[in-house]
């Protein structure tokens, strides 16, 4: 039978192959379902901005139906929908829902260290003060590579004083 490729957006499977997959990915049906999936995660402000640029769909507003649906190049929002979106966008702003900005590694590391220091009272061991696990402490003549060093020992090692490996 051969390998099958399953598309999560379309919910269908077909024979896996570069040509078949390429045909499927460029199909209008797949692209419509993929767009609908990602549109579910848009916030109210983004939806408002996109629809402000569009003119109202005459067919949708007169007949209540448009054969193009979500793929229509015109806006299907009513005045009531626009008011609700504005209210929802304002609530999101007030709630402090901000887009996540990527932190640089230094600030991320500082926040992690602060959290570790704050929660170190509850934890039995802290990475800055390592404790040998009880399983390893019962083994006699443990190799030095398995014995954790203290931060002061680690900082006191100079380049000339470091042990040579291999």
Image (spheres, helix red, strand yellow):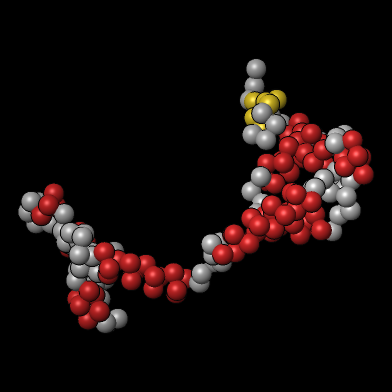
Residue 6 visible, this angle: yes
* Residue at the extreme top: 1
Residue 163 occupies quadrant: bottom left
Nearer the observer, 21 or 92: 92
In which quadrant will I find the N terminus? top right
Residue 147 occupies quadrant: bottom left
Nearer the observer, 14 or 57: 57
In which quadrant will I find the C terminus? bottom left
Residue 130 visible, this angle: no
Above or below — where is 66 with respect to 140? above
Tally of numbered tags? 0
Instruction: Please report the residue visible at 27 percent of the width from the left and 69 percent of the height from the top.
Output: 117
Nearer the observer, 84 or 132: 84
97 displayed left or right of 55: left
Residue 59: x percent and y percent? Answer: 92, 40
Instruction: Please report the residue visible at 23 percent of the width from the left and 65 percent of the height from the top.
Output: 120
Instruction: Please report the residue visible at 77 percent of the width from the left and 40 percent of the height from the top.
Output: 31
Nearer the observer, 87 or 128: 87
Residue 89: x percent and y percent? Answer: 65, 59
35 displayed left or right of 74: left
Residue 64 occupies quadrant: top right
Above or below — where is 138 with respect to 166? above
Above or below — where is 71 with respect to 53? above
Residue 48: x percent and y percent? Answer: 74, 57
48 displayed left or right of 97: right
Residue 62: x percent and y percent? Answer: 91, 39
Instruction: Please report the residue visible at 59 percent of the width from the left and 59 percent of the height from the top.
Output: 92
């Amino acid at each position: 039978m051969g390998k099958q490729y399953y598309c999560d957006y379309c919910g269908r499977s077909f024979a896996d192959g570069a040509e078949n997959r390429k045909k499927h990915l460029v199909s209008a049906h797949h692209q419509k379902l993929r767009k609908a999936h990602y549109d579910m995660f848009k916030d109210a402000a983004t939806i408002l901005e996109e629809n402000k640029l569009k003119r109202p769909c005459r067919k949708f507003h007169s007949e209540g139906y448009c054969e193009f649906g979500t793929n229509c190049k015109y806006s299907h929002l009513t005045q009531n929908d626009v008011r609700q979106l504005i209210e929802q966008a304002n609530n999101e702003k007030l709630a402090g829902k901000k887009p996540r900005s990527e932190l640089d590694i230094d600030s991320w590391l500082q926040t992690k260290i602060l959290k570790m220091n704050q929660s170190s009272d509850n934890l039995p061991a802290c990475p800055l003060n390592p404790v040998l696990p009880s399983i390893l402490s019962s083994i006699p003549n443990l190799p030095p590579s398995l014995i954790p060093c203290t931060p002061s020992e680690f900082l006191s090692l100079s380049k000339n004083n470091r042990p040579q490996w291999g």
